[in-house]
């Protein structure tokens, strides 16, 4: 298991992101926190020509968090195939569970992946 802390800033609220009208932690910001934690965990094992991209996320956001709250994201690697890694995650605001779910990332060659944009 790995964990990372994030602070809820105005930029991460639903009102600012546009996913809602309240100054509470936005669900898209929770996704960003989870993806960042998983990305950093996997990236340390790759060379500079490789990275991972998110391909799937299942999220249940069950409780609001206010600005200034510290969100702790905990991720556990459930399964790793050749280039695909699936994580289970939970997010807490102090001791309160605010979100759970799973996230999948796939390893890619940066140059080859970006060539798909042409």
Image (cartoon, rainbow, N blue to C red):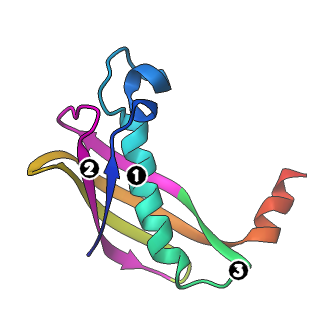
**Foreground disc of the pair 2, 3:** 2
Q: Residues within 10 Å of mark 1 (few under 14, many from 20)?
A: some
Would you place residue 60 above or below residue 86 in this image? Answer: above
Callout 2: SS: strand
Residue 74 against residue 19 in the figure, above or below? below
The answer for how far apart the CA atoms under marks 2 and 1 are is: 9 Å
Query: Which type of secondary structure does the marked residue at label 1 adopt?
Result: helix
Q: Residues within 10 Å of mark 2 (few under 14, many from 20)?
A: many
Q: Residue furthest front?
A: 68
Label 3: which residue? 48
Residue 33 is labelled as 1
Q: Is residue 102 left or right of residue 92?
A: right
Numbered badge on residue 86: none
Q: What SS does tag 3 mark?
A: loop
Q: Which residue is mark 2?
A: 71
Taking the magenta stretch, the answer to whether it contains residue 51 is no
Q: Nearer the viewer, mark 2 or mark 1?
A: 2
Category of crowding for the residue at label 3, using alpha-carbon neighbours closer than 10 angstroms: few (below 14), some (14–19), many (at least 20): few
- Distance between the alpha carbons at the discs numbered 1 and 3: 22 Å
**Residues drawn in magenta:** 55-81
Horizontal and vertical percent position of residue 39: 50, 66
Q: Are marks 2 and 3 in contact (CB under 8 Å)?
A: no
Residue 43 in picture, x, y percent from top left: 55, 76
| Numbered disc total | 3
Q: Quadrant of the N terminus?
A: bottom left
């Amino acid at each position: 298991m790995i964990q990372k802390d994030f602070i809820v800033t105005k930029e991460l609220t639903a009102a600012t992101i546009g996913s809602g009208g309240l100054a509470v932690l936005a669900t898209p910001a929770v996704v960003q926190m989870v993806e960042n934690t998983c990305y950093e965990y996997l990236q340390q094992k790759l060379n500079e020509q490789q990275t991972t991209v998110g391909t799937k996320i299942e999220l249940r956001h069950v409780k609001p968090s206010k600005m200034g709250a510290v969100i702790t994201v905990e991720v556990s690697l459930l399964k790793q195939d050749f280039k695909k890694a699936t994580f289970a995650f939970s997010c807490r605001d102090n001791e309160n569970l605010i979100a759970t779910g799973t996230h999948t990332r796939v390893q890619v060659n940066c140059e080859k992946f970006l060539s798909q944009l042409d």
